[in-house]
Each structure stands twice: as C-alpha cells, then as structure tokens.
Image (cartoon, helix red, strand yellow):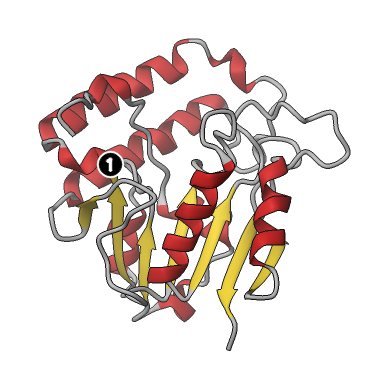
C-alpha cells in the first residue's frame, strides 16, 4: 500500500437511492440481511441501508487512507468531474433531471459517507481478495468497476474478483455492464464482451442472468448481472 497515493484515485460515490435503482433493491426484503458494497468508494449506501435495518458494510482500497484525506480528495474529485460536463451530453437524465442535480447526488453521497465512515463498517480490501469468511454476506453489490474498466482490468481479474465475491456472498449483483465511455454504443448489444465470457464461465455452476433495472444514464446501460448460488 505504500506505493498508492490518494491522488491516484478519483473518489466518487453514489447514494442509497441510486443503489436501489442500479440493483432493483427491495429495502423491506433486505431488512436484517448482510449486504456488502464492493467497492464502496465514497457512497452513502451503507449509511442509509443501516437506517433501514440492513446489515450493510463496504470494502474498498481507499479505506486505508485517513478521513481527512478522503474528504479533501472527494471534494477535489467532484470539482474535476464537473469542470467540463460536456462528457454527459447525450446521456439520459430521466433519473437525475439535470446536470446540477446529478452533481448534488455526488455531493450528498460524499457528505453522508464521511459522516458515517468508521473502521468497522468500512474495511480496506484490494480485489480480488476480500477479508471476509466464506458465506459472510447474503448479497454483494458491485457497481462501476467490473466491465466498466475492461480496457485496463482483464478477464482474469474479472473472474477472480467475481469468484471471490461468490465465495463470501450467496448472491452477487454487478452494474453496469457497459464500459465507462460506452465505446460500443453504436452496436446492437453494447455490453462489455467480458459479460458473455463471465456468463459462459459461471453457467451451470451458478444461476446467472442479465436483468433490466429501473435506471439508465448511458444508452443501453439499464441492466445488471445477477449471479446466485444454486439452491
């Protein structure tokens, strides 16, 4: 970890409401369930989920840094992201309504994350290795990492990370299934090619399905991958 610096990261987070939309979450059904957000970043899912009676925790490589550093880098990251918002042109703002409101979601997530941050619920981890026992969680949520950065995280990393999530969780949900640039937007099916390879590798051993979700920001991005242990 000594080689990692906070400046290496853009620290961003999503809100509890966004997570519910990303993953088709039912808060009532999740009450009393053990849920891991991995990687959690500066998201406020854990903060709000605990208020709903969900036994939520988060894991991320950035949790090795002190809260003062996370706050400073989180605020700087928001400034960087919205310095030139032209990257959002052509996106679907049905959920967010506007670019300023999109920013308010990022600011709210960071504020609530910093309010809740502690060493028990937020644990340092570096995929594909997670510091939890087998079957420690009922559900593992992973957003905006796998498939999103398929230009720098290879198939081996994806498979090792997903298998590790399945080791500790009875069910894994991954969102979105497109890369961060949506570079295949003009194709009939714009999912990362790694989605199909993951499904092929896990099919038969696990129940695997692509499911639509009530959220779309990039064209064709309104889907998650749901993987469950067979019962």
Of all residues, the one furthest to the bottom in this rendering is: 231
The foreground one among 20 and 195 is 195
Q: Position of residue 203 (x, y in %)?
A: 69, 69
Q: Is residue 132 left or right of residue 183?
A: left
Which corner quadrant holds the C terminus? bottom right
Q: Taking 143 as reference, is 10 above or below it?
A: above
Q: Taking 29 as reference, is 164 above or below it?
A: above
**Which residue is at 37% across, 23% downward?**
78
Which corner quadrant holds the N terminus? top left
**Which residue is at 61% across, 43% downward?**
95
Q: Position of residue 111 (x, y in %)?
A: 26, 39
Q: Taking 76 as reference, is 13 above or below it?
A: below
**Which residue is at 47% across, 68% downward?**
166
Residue indicated by mark 1: 61
Q: Quadrant of residue 2?
A: top left
Of all residues, the one furthest to the front in this rendering is: 156
The foreground one among 115 and 135 is 135
Q: Is residue 193 left or right of residue 160?
A: right
Q: Is residue 213 visible?
A: no
Q: Is residue 61 left or right of residue 208?
A: left
Q: Position of residue 137 (x, y in %)?
A: 36, 73
Secondary structure, mark 1, is: helix
Of all residues, the one furthest to the top in this rendering is: 84
**Which residue is at 37% across, 68% downward?**
35
Q: Taking 199 as reference, is 66 above or below it?
A: above
Q: Position of residue 225 (x, y in %)?
A: 63, 58
Q: Is residue 148 visible?
A: yes
Q: What number of labels is visible?
A: 1
Mark 1 is surrounded, within 10 Å at the Cα level, by few (under 14), some (14 to 19) or many (20 or more) other residues, namely: some
Q: Is residue 64 left or right of residue 147?
A: left
């Amino acid at each position: 970890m000594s080689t990692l610096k906070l400046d290496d990261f853009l620290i961003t987070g999503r809100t509890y409401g966004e997570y519910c939309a990303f993953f088709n979450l039912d808060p009532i059904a999740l009450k009393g369930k053990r849920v891991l957000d991995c990687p959690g970043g500066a998201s406020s899912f854990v903060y709000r989920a605990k208020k709903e009676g969900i036994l939520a925790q988060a894991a991320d490589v950035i949790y090795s840094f002190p809260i003062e550093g996370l706050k400073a880098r989180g605020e700087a990251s928001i400034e960087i992201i919205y310095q030139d918002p032209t990257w959002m042109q052509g996106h679907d703002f049905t959920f967010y309504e506007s670019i300023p409101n999109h920013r308010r979601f990022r600011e709210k997530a960071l504020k609530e994350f910093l309010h809740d941050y502690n060493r028990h619920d937020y644990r340092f981890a570096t995929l594909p290795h997670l510091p939890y026992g087998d079957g420690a969680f009922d559900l593992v949520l992973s957003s905006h990492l796998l498939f999103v950065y398929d230009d720098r995280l290879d198939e081996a990393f994806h498979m090792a990370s997903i298998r590790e999530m399945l080791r500790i969780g009875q069910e894994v949900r991954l969102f979105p299934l497109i890369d961060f640039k949506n570079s295949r937007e003009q194709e009939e099916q714009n999912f990362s090619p790694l989605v199909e390879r993951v499904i092929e590798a896990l099919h038969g051993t696990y129940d695997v399905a692509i499911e639509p979700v009530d959220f779309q920001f990039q064209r064709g991005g309104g889907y998650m991958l749901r993987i469950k242990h067979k019962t």
